[in-house]
Image (cartoon, rainbow, N blue to C red):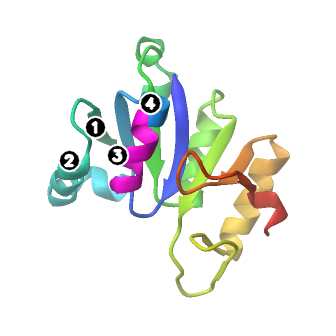
Amino acid sequence: MIKLIRIDDRLVHGQVAFTWVPSLGIDCLIVANDKIARDDFQKMTLGLAKPAGVKLLIKSVADTIAFLNDEKNKPAKILVLVNSVKDAATLASGVSEISSINFGGIRAKENAKLISKAVALTDEDVVLIKELLQKGIELEIRQVPTDEKQKVGSLI
Protein backbone atom coordinates (compact mmCIF):
# COMPACT_ATOMS: atom_id res chain seq x y z
CA MET A 1 0.00 0.00 0.00
CA ILE A 2 1.32 3.40 -0.95
CA LYS A 3 1.40 5.52 2.21
CA LEU A 4 3.05 8.59 0.68
CA ILE A 5 4.47 9.94 -2.57
CA ARG A 6 6.95 12.69 -1.68
CA ILE A 7 8.81 15.12 -3.91
CA ASP A 8 12.05 16.01 -2.19
CA ASP A 9 15.24 16.77 -4.07
CA ARG A 10 17.28 15.48 -1.10
CA LEU A 11 15.49 12.11 -1.36
CA VAL A 12 16.49 10.05 1.72
CA HIS A 13 17.50 12.27 4.66
CA GLY A 14 16.72 12.95 8.31
CA GLN A 15 13.16 14.26 7.91
CA VAL A 16 12.22 11.19 5.92
CA ALA A 17 14.07 8.68 8.11
CA PHE A 18 13.13 10.05 11.53
CA THR A 19 9.69 11.61 11.06
CA TRP A 20 7.86 10.28 7.98
CA VAL A 21 8.94 6.64 8.24
CA PRO A 22 7.85 6.12 11.88
CA SER A 23 4.76 8.31 11.58
CA LEU A 24 3.42 6.28 8.65
CA GLY A 25 4.76 2.89 9.75
CA ILE A 26 6.80 2.60 6.56
CA ASP A 27 8.60 -0.69 5.88
CA CYS A 28 9.70 0.03 2.29
CA LEU A 29 11.29 3.19 0.86
CA ILE A 30 11.47 3.50 -2.90
CA VAL A 31 13.65 6.09 -4.59
CA ALA A 32 12.20 6.46 -8.09
CA ASN A 33 14.85 8.10 -10.23
CA ASP A 34 16.22 7.03 -13.61
CA LYS A 35 19.67 8.53 -13.11
CA ILE A 36 20.26 7.27 -9.57
CA ALA A 37 19.05 3.77 -10.51
CA ARG A 38 22.14 3.55 -12.77
CA ASP A 39 24.62 5.14 -10.32
CA ASP A 40 26.15 2.68 -7.85
CA PHE A 41 27.85 5.41 -5.80
CA GLN A 42 24.63 7.36 -5.27
CA LYS A 43 22.77 4.15 -4.46
CA MET A 44 25.39 3.37 -1.81
CA THR A 45 25.17 6.84 -0.22
CA LEU A 46 21.36 6.73 -0.12
CA GLY A 47 21.60 3.32 1.51
CA LEU A 48 23.62 4.86 4.34
CA ALA A 49 20.80 7.30 5.07
CA LYS A 50 17.98 4.77 5.26
CA PRO A 51 16.51 3.94 8.65
CA ALA A 52 17.27 0.55 10.19
CA GLY A 53 14.66 -2.11 9.56
CA VAL A 54 13.33 -0.45 6.42
CA LYS A 55 13.87 -1.89 2.97
CA LEU A 56 15.31 0.57 0.43
CA LEU A 57 14.67 0.06 -3.27
CA ILE A 58 16.18 2.33 -5.90
CA LYS A 59 14.41 1.95 -9.24
CA SER A 60 13.80 3.77 -12.47
CA VAL A 61 10.48 5.56 -12.66
CA ALA A 62 9.12 2.92 -15.09
CA ASP A 63 10.24 0.07 -12.81
CA THR A 64 8.66 1.84 -9.84
CA ILE A 65 5.34 2.03 -11.69
CA ALA A 66 5.51 -1.71 -12.42
CA PHE A 67 6.40 -2.44 -8.76
CA LEU A 68 3.55 -0.31 -7.39
CA ASN A 69 1.03 -1.91 -9.77
CA ASP A 70 2.09 -5.46 -8.85
CA GLU A 71 -0.49 -7.00 -6.49
CA LYS A 72 2.17 -8.98 -4.60
CA ASN A 73 3.66 -5.69 -3.32
CA LYS A 74 0.37 -4.33 -1.91
CA PRO A 75 1.02 -5.55 1.68
CA ALA A 76 4.14 -3.36 1.97
CA LYS A 77 3.77 0.08 3.55
CA ILE A 78 5.54 2.16 0.93
CA LEU A 79 6.93 5.69 0.85
CA VAL A 80 8.01 6.70 -2.66
CA LEU A 81 10.57 9.47 -3.03
CA VAL A 82 11.11 11.41 -6.24
CA ASN A 83 13.15 14.55 -6.80
CA SER A 84 10.99 16.31 -9.39
CA VAL A 85 7.41 17.24 -10.18
CA LYS A 86 7.90 15.57 -13.57
CA ASP A 87 8.71 12.18 -12.02
CA ALA A 88 5.77 12.49 -9.58
CA ALA A 89 3.43 13.28 -12.48
CA THR A 90 4.73 10.26 -14.41
CA LEU A 91 4.10 8.03 -11.40
CA ALA A 92 0.59 9.44 -10.96
CA SER A 93 -0.16 8.75 -14.63
CA GLY A 94 0.96 5.15 -14.32
CA VAL A 95 -0.41 4.20 -10.88
CA SER A 96 -4.14 4.69 -10.32
CA GLU A 97 -3.75 4.25 -6.53
CA ILE A 98 -1.97 7.62 -6.24
CA SER A 99 -4.43 10.21 -4.96
CA SER A 100 -2.09 12.56 -3.09
CA ILE A 101 1.44 13.92 -3.53
CA ASN A 102 3.46 15.59 -0.79
CA PHE A 103 5.88 18.38 -1.71
CA GLY A 104 8.72 18.27 0.79
CA GLY A 105 11.54 20.25 -0.71
CA ILE A 106 12.52 21.49 -4.13
CA ARG A 107 15.45 23.87 -3.90
CA ALA A 108 15.58 27.13 -5.82
CA LYS A 109 17.18 26.96 -9.23
CA GLU A 110 17.31 29.07 -12.36
CA ASN A 111 13.84 30.03 -13.65
CA ALA A 112 12.11 28.76 -10.50
CA LYS A 113 10.14 30.81 -8.01
CA LEU A 114 9.55 30.06 -4.36
CA ILE A 115 5.96 29.23 -3.46
CA SER A 116 6.87 28.28 0.13
CA LYS A 117 9.98 28.31 2.28
CA ALA A 118 11.14 24.98 0.84
CA VAL A 119 9.50 24.63 -2.59
CA ALA A 120 10.58 26.43 -5.77
CA LEU A 121 8.77 25.69 -9.03
CA THR A 122 9.50 26.31 -12.69
CA ASP A 123 6.84 27.16 -15.27
CA GLU A 124 7.05 23.54 -16.47
CA ASP A 125 6.35 22.34 -12.92
CA VAL A 126 3.28 24.59 -12.72
CA VAL A 127 1.87 23.14 -15.95
CA LEU A 128 2.27 19.60 -14.56
CA ILE A 129 0.76 20.64 -11.23
CA LYS A 130 -2.33 22.02 -12.96
CA GLU A 131 -2.72 18.75 -14.86
CA LEU A 132 -2.45 16.77 -11.61
CA LEU A 133 -5.01 19.01 -9.91
CA GLN A 134 -7.40 18.53 -12.85
CA LYS A 135 -7.13 14.77 -12.29
CA GLY A 136 -8.26 15.31 -8.69
CA ILE A 137 -4.91 14.51 -7.08
CA GLU A 138 -4.28 16.27 -3.77
CA LEU A 139 -1.04 18.27 -3.84
CA GLU A 140 0.17 19.45 -0.45
CA ILE A 141 3.28 20.90 1.14
CA ARG A 142 4.53 19.64 4.49
CA GLN A 143 8.07 19.24 5.72
CA VAL A 144 7.10 16.82 8.47
CA PRO A 145 3.86 14.95 9.25
CA THR A 146 2.88 17.29 12.08
CA ASP A 147 2.95 20.40 9.86
CA GLU A 148 -0.37 21.74 8.66
CA LYS A 149 -1.00 20.92 5.00
CA GLN A 150 -0.60 23.80 2.56
CA LYS A 151 -2.46 23.26 -0.69
CA VAL A 152 -0.10 23.70 -3.66
CA GLY A 153 -2.93 24.91 -5.89
CA SER A 154 -3.54 27.93 -3.68
CA LEU A 155 0.15 28.93 -3.82
CA ILE A 156 0.78 28.91 -7.58
x 58%, y 47%: residue: 146
Q: Position of residue 47 (x, y in %)?
A: 20, 47
User: Mark 1, residues whose alpha carbon is within 10 Å: few (<14), some, or many (≥20)?
Assistant: many
Quadrant assignment, res 93: top right
Q: Of the residues tagged 2 and 3, which is closer to the observer? A: 3
Q: Is residue 64 visible?
A: no
Q: Is label 1 in a helix, a strand or a loop?
A: strand
Disc 2 from disc 4: Cα separation:
16 Å
Q: Position of residue 128 (x, y in %)?
A: 71, 59
- The quarter of the rendered structure image containing the C terminus is bottom right
Q: Earlier in the sequence, mark 3 or mark 4?
A: 3
Quadrant assignment, res 62: top left
Which residue is the site of mark 1?
Answer: 56
Depth check: give the residue in front, 149 or 130. 149
Q: Earlier in the sequence, mark 2 or mark 3?
A: 3
On the rendered structure, is 35 left or right of 149?
Answer: left
* Callout 1–callout 2 Cβ contact below 8 Å: yes
Give the residue type at disc 3.
Ala
Q: What segment is highlighted magenta in the picture?
A: 14-22
On the rendered structure, is 13 left or right of 153?
Answer: left
Residue 15 covered by magenta stretch: yes
* Callout 2–callout 3 Cβ contact below 8 Å: no
Which residue is the site of mark 2?
Answer: 47
* Callout 3–callout 4 Cβ contact below 8 Å: no
Q: Of the residues tagged 3 and 4, which is closer to the observer? A: 3
Which residue is the site of mark 3?
Answer: 17
Q: Earlier in the sequence, mark 1 or mark 2?
A: 2
Q: Earlier in the sequence, mark 4 or mark 1?
A: 1
x 63%, y 41%: residue: 92
Which residue is the site of mark 4?
Answer: 78
